[in-house]
Image: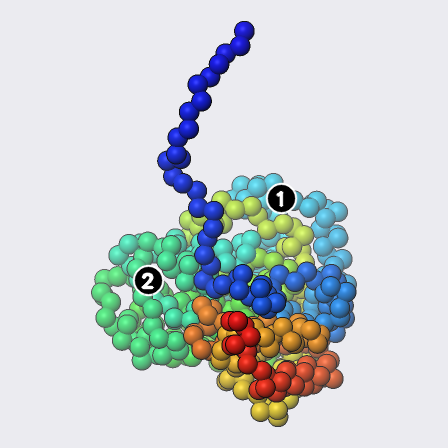
Amino acid sequence: MTVHMKSTTTAPLFPLRTTWDTKWDIERFKKAGLYTWFKEIQEELSDGWVKVNNQKMLMLGGYSYLGLNNHPDINQAAIDSIEKFGTGMNGSRFLAGTTTMHSRLEKKIASLHGKEDAMVLSSGYLANVSTLTCLLRRSDYIVCDRLNHASIMDGARYAQAKLVKYRHNDLEHLETTLGSLPNTARKLVVTDSIFSMSGAVADLPGIIKICKKYSAILMVDECHSMYVLGKYGGGIVEYFDLDPNDIDIIMATLSKAIPSSGGYLAASAKIIEFLRHESRGFIYSGALTTTLTSTALKALEIFEEKRESLVTRLHKNTAIFSNALHAYGIEIGNSKTSIIPILIGDGATAAVVAKKCQERGIYIHAVFPPVVPLGKSILRASITAVHMKEDLLMAAKIIYEVLEEMQHLDVQGQFIG
């Protein structure tokens, strides 16, 4: 028996959008041959070099500050973990996802930060977002430096508490802001320790003083400072010789100086206990795999054993590169860290400079609005402990030569036309 159905055509209730506009014109960059992102790295070589499209390139765009990625002992820790636990996890940390390796890692992190306890999540982004969204309620306030990392700003926007921003590194404005908030409200001040685009260090002693005056909780993101800043890599606490108890919550990552993945929080036992039972990003996400947990733990052990020599080499290499750029008259701002911003200004010019540097074997990227303010585009270099002096001097020379060539090139006309 054949059933004939009547054909009807109706417009969808919610028409699908087939295109979405990004904040910057991707197609324009591709058309101009200046799209330099998402390059596939084929292999990590030695001394800070990588292979991309069968080309050997000096890596100045990554975060392996201590050069520990591909360390044989860390690689072996991953292999041993797979043989004992397999490659996956059985659930979230709240249920079947906590192993002896997770507990050991959290104890090690707490000890390194001088805190009572720590909590590891599957990413640094998740650590910031899930913490900020659960700590405060509707009548409370989150007070942020305007140039805080996107994960902090997103967490603050998603939270029930009201978001208030203060001018970048402006302690007078921070104090004015806190003083204007209701005395009955809880207030949480959040700041990066090192700002990821400029390499600038937050004035944490001043921030601590203001937080104490207004009874504000203080949370500090140490993703770019822990294991890097200070003589022994003890982060911003060591750099300023602070009491770790003056920072209520420390957040940091296991995916930069530590060659693994994940983010973590270090705080009092009471705060960590609260977060373990209230943080939705922790409760409803799969646990960090034991492979990553084991590699992070082994990397921290190596750091503890060799921290002085690793950090000394990092700081020496940073000085070599910074001094070479200065000698060429290249502006790099006031960075005190291994993040070195090469000041360009115009976004189109920065894109062309990055492209030309990559063509000459320097893996570096341009950064422009909305990540940095309008008219303040940069190339951002990240130095590591394993870079060789001659390679850093060569990179500085190439950057200088490219910038010299740009003096004779109508970038805006070529780019827009």
Q: Residue at left 46%, top 78%?
A: 376
In front of the other: 13 or 147 = 13
- Residue 320 horizontal side relative to residue 237, left or right: right
The amino acid at mark 1 is Met
Residue 20 in picture, x, y percent from top left: 46, 53
Q: Mark number for residue 89?
A: 1
The residue that mark 2 highlights is 163
Residue 195 in picture, x, y percent from top left: 48, 73
The secondary element bearing badge 2 is classed as: strand
Q: Quadrant of residue 262?
A: bottom right
- Figure coloring: rainbow
On screen, 385 above or below 159? Answer: below
Q: Could you classify mark 1 by the number of other residues whose Cα lies within 10 Å: few (under 14), some (14-19), or many (20 or more)? A: some
- Residue 156 horizontal side relative to residue 317, left or right: left
Q: Residue at left 59%, top 71%?
A: 365
On screen, 20 above or below 323? Answer: above
Q: Could you classify mark 2 by the number of other residues whose Cα lies within 10 Å: few (under 14), some (14-19), or many (20 or more)? A: some
The residue lying furthest to the front in this view is 417
The residue lying furthest to the top in this view is 1
Q: Residue at left 40%, top 35%?
A: 12
The amino acid at mark 2 is Leu
N-terminal of the two: label 1 or label 2?
1
In front of the other: 114 or 26 = 26
The secondary element bearing badge 1 is classed as: loop
On screen, 228 above or below 84? Answer: below
Q: Mark number for residue 274?
A: none
CA separation in Å, label 1 and label 2 = 36 Å
Q: Residue at left 51%, top 44%?
A: 94
In front of the other: 384 or 44 = 44
